[in-house]
Amino acid sequence: MKILAPFIVGLLFGLGLCLGGMSQPQKVLGFLDLAGAWDPSLAFVMGGAVSIAFVAFRVLAGRERSLNGAPLALPQARAIDARLLGGAALFGIGWGLAGFCPGPALVGLGFLSPGALLFVVAMAAGMILVEALSALPAPDAATEDV
């Protein structure tokens, strides 16, 4: 059951992305085109997802273990810093240029979409780059010239 539950949840997530049109870049780009042929339908998909996540996080807030017994590790960070803002900006730019975000891009791989493949390769390269840059030592403010 510990393997089956995440599989079923992932399957439902992918099915929801397909039914909601999130795996179609042209639909996503239509949603982002506020000045042109705007397609508001994805607002309902996102609203539904946010509503479900809101309820789920409230239910999980008082628990130490998931339904399958695994320990819960809910996010604790609350700070809005440069790393968060930079990541959000890169996410938005990538979404706007490609019409994909990570989940739908992985679904697109299942449909053998060349655009999804390109996006996933670029996403993986970005993740590797962030890990490499994060491993660099931070500059010491005390030794810098003022």
Image (cartoon, rainbow, N blue to C red):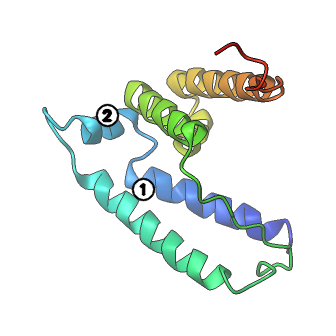
Give residue 135's position: percent from left, percent from top: 84, 27
Residue shown at 61% from the left, 84% from the top: 59
The foreground one among 51 and 103 is: 51
Q: Quadrant of the C terminus?
A: top right
Give residue 130's position: percent from left, percent from top: 71, 27
The foreground one among 38 and 19 is: 38
The image quadrant of residue 82 is: top right
| Residue pointed to by mark 1 | 19
Extreme residue in the front direction: 146
Mark 1 crowdedness (10 Å alpha carbons): few <14, some 14-19, many ≥20: few
Residue shown at 69% from the left, 66% from the top: 8
Extreme residue in the top direction: 145
Residue 125 horizontal side relative to residue 91, left or right: right
Helix, strand or loop under label 1: helix
| Residue pointed to by mark 2 | 29
The foreground one among 92 and 107 is: 92
Give residue 83's position: percent from left, percent from top: 60, 37
Q: Nearer the viewer, mark 1 or mark 2?
A: 2
